[in-house]
Image (spheres, rainbow, N blue to C red):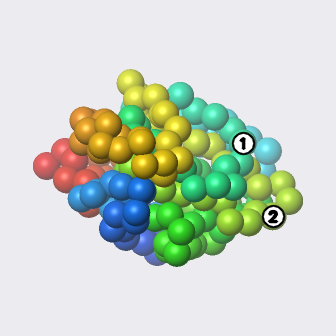
Amino acid sequence: MNPIIQKPRNVIVRTLPENGNFPNAGKRPLVIYDQVLKLPGNHAPDLIETIIESNGWGNAWRWGLYGYHHYHSTAHECLCIYAGSVRVQFGGPGGFAVDAYPGDVVILPAGLTHKNVRNSLGFRTVGCYPKGQSPDMKYGKPAERPAADKAIAAVSLPQLDPIFGKGGELSKQWKMNV
């Protein structure tokens, strides 16, 4: 195993129900690995990208997280926090919120609404998607559905967990490689 990957301190698995105009992924839960990456200094984003690419995730970007409710109907998403902290709300208005710190990995199924509620100065994440998937942007507008629901249902499962490859809680929860 890669030396920066460690057993998560905790694994959060949460399925969020539909919330008005936000579909919230249906059967696939949000999976959060708490403190799964032991990040060494300035090279953390490069090391994260090496791990996710080796596990079939790509189209990576480095930045923050939008401060408004949105979701992607055409791709699953993974956020690997490497600097600062962020409070993320999932599921739309009134949804579940969690604080994420360097070393945390958040894996969202297509359709799961998310929003940056607040972040520390210098917050950064490496975001990525399963290879072959590209995200669209949906904002919870009534006109986006039912086309968004059809698109979400058509999004294929990733081949591997972005961190653990063939193992990990994501494989179990999303019934991958079984």
Q: Quadrant of residue 131?
A: top left
Label of residue 63 in the image: 1
The amino acid sitting under disc 1 is: Trp
- Residues 149 and 169: in front is 149
Among numbered discs 2 and 1, the one appearing first in the sequence? 1
Q: Which SS class for mark 2?
A: loop
Q: Which SS class for mark 1?
A: strand
Residue 69 screen position, x and y as percent: 57, 56
Farthest left residue in view:
178
User: Would residue 36 appear left or right of 174 to someone viewing this image?
Assistant: right
Q: Which residue is mark 2?
A: 120
The amino acid sitting under disc 2 is: Ser
Residue 128 screen position, x and y as percent: 52, 38
Q: Image point 72% across, 42% down: which residue? A: 63
Residue 10 visible in rendering: yes
Q: Quadrant of residue 100?
A: bottom right
Label of residue 174 in the image: none
